[in-house]
Image (tube, grey):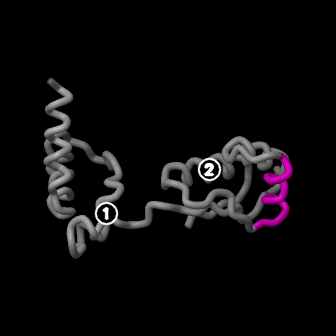
Amino acid sequence: MADNKIQQVIKTVEGLTVTELAELVKALKDKFGVTGPVFAAGGAGPAAGGAAGPAEAKAEEQTEFNVTLVSVGDKKIQVLKELRAVTQLGLKEAKDIIDKTPSLVKENATKEEADKIKAKLEEVGAKVEVK
């Protein structure tokens, strides 16, 4: 029975315009007291709802980020270890990134993933940019 309700809600949401979807998200946040982002509405862009208004323009901000290692700092070995841990790169590939700074560490990362990589590398003394 719950599965049927969920399918009905999904069908209803699919029929909403981008503006209506933004209003729904705001109403749900207000109703349940949510203060941060709940989910990313992937795929719901101007093609789904026509011209983007101010609310949609804000919702369509950058979703993919590039993480760039700007400098290694004093702790090259610790940065190398952490770089390998967060990227799953081999030793040679990670060393090449460190030796050729500024270097792209991760391309098309989500905001959360980019922030995590940046935090981990900065903990060990590296300088990182997220664009």
In the image, which disc is placed on residue 117?
A: 2
Expressed as whole percent of the image width and height from the top left, the position of residue 86 reads 67, 44
In the image, which disc is placed on residue 113?
A: none
Q: What predominant SS class does the magenta segment belong to?
A: helix
For the C terminus, which image quadrant?
A: bottom right
Where is 4 relative to 44, above or below? above
Question: How many residues crowd mark 2 within 10 Å: few (<14), some (14–19), many (20+)?
Answer: many
Q: Which residues are magenta?
A: 91-101
Left or right, 85 with respect to 96, comes to: left
The residue lying toward the viewer, choosing from 50 and 32, is 50
Q: Earlier in the sequence, mark 1 or mark 2?
A: 1
Label 2 sits on a secondary structure element that is: helix
Quarter assignment of residue 59:
bottom left
Residue type beneath disc 1: Ala
At a point 65% along the width and 46% down the height, the residue shown is 120
At a point 27% along the width and 70% down the height, the residue shown is 46
For the N terminus, which image quadrant?
A: top left
Residue type beneath disc 2: Ile
Residue situated furthest top in the rendering: 1
> To which residue does mark 1 refer?
59
The answer to whether marks 1 and 2 mark residues whose Cβ atoms lie closer than 8 Å is: no
Expressed as whole percent of the image width and height from the top left, the position of residue 119 reads 61, 49
At a point 71% along the width and 43% down the height, the residue shown is 88
Quarter assignment of residue 68:
bottom right
Expressed as whole percent of the image width and height from the top left, the position of residue 118 reads 62, 53
Asked if residue 31 lies in the magenta stretch, the reply is no
At a point 14% along the width and 50% down the height, the residue shown is 27
Left or right, 41 with respect to 33, comes to: right
